[in-house]
Image (cartoon, rainbow, N blue to C red):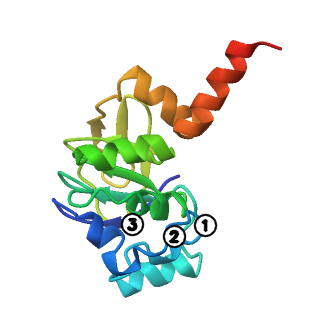
Amino acid sequence: MPKVVLKVGDDVSTDVIYPGRFMATVLPTETPQFAFADDANFNGKLKAKQVPPGSVVVGGRNFGCGSSREQAVSCLKGHDLVIVAKSFARIFLQNGINLGLRMVVCPELEASEGDDLEITAEAIRNLTSGKVFPVEPMPRSRQAILDAGGLIPYTRERLLRRSGP
């Protein structure tokens, strides 16, 4: 069962997710160490592998605003986090889709750190509070890219299907 491991507010910048001073590090295998680097407690838990894969970061409106840095997505994907937000900044959302980051848009979500969530394509059930919140589905074309694990796996899959056996 996914658990909320971090809750942040509205307008969380990519500089909060992946501080600019680490921009020289671009490899997706290296970016995870800098996820939320200025939050020493949470970053320490991530580095110590105390955050299980599939754990949830809850954001408010406009999650991922600011710079278009792709590292803000790759550092989260590297920890296999699920990001649930009331809304996402446009460029962050597209970068997330391209890299296959699990993201859910849930405008009415009420959740706190430590809450257990059940996430489906239609709704999020907060098992701690018992409340259910509708999810805004991604357009089918974007969901197909996410389901494939990102734009590169999606394209590879389509090219292989087109070329036949």
Question: From this viewpoint, which residue is outermost toward the right?
Answer: 165
Residue under numbered circle 1: 29
Residue under numbered circle 3: 114
Is any atom of residue 15 visible in this view?
yes
Q: Which quadrant would residue 4 be assigned to in this image?
A: bottom left
Quadrant, the C terminus: top right
Q: Residue at x 37, y 28 (%)?
A: 122
Q: Nearer the viewer, residue 92 or 104?
A: 92
Residues at marks 3 and 1, CA–CA distance in whole angstroms: 28 Å
Identify the amino acid type marked 1: Thr
Q: Nearer the viewer, residue 54 or 69?
A: 69
Query: In the image, which disc is placed on residue 32?
Result: 2
Q: Residue at x 43, y 22 (%)?
A: 141
Q: Position of residue 17 (x, y in %)?
A: 34, 68
Closer to the observer: label 3 or label 1?
1
Q: Residues within 10 Å of mark 3 (few under 14, many from 20)?
A: some
Q: Residues within 10 Å of mark 1 (few under 14, many from 20)?
A: few
Q: Nearer the viewer, residue 51 or 125?
A: 51
Tell me, yes or no, whether the two marked residues, 1 and 2, touch with CB atoms within 8 Å: yes
Identify the amino acid type marked 2: Pro
Residues at marks 1 and 2, CA–CA distance in whole angstroms: 7 Å
Closer to the observer: label 1 or label 2?
1
Mark 2: secondary structure: helix
Identify the amino acid type marked 3: Gly
Tell me, yes or no, whether the two marked residues, 3 and 1, touch with CB atoms within 8 Å: no
Question: From this viewpoint, which residue is outermost toward the front?
Answer: 24
Q: Residues within 10 Å of mark 2 (few under 14, many from 20)?
A: many
Q: Which quadrant would residue 73 be assigned to in this image?
A: bottom left
Reading the chain from its start, which is encountered first: label 3 or label 1? 1
Mark 1: secondary structure: loop
Mark 3: secondary structure: loop
Reading the chain from its start, which is encountered first: label 3 or label 2? 2
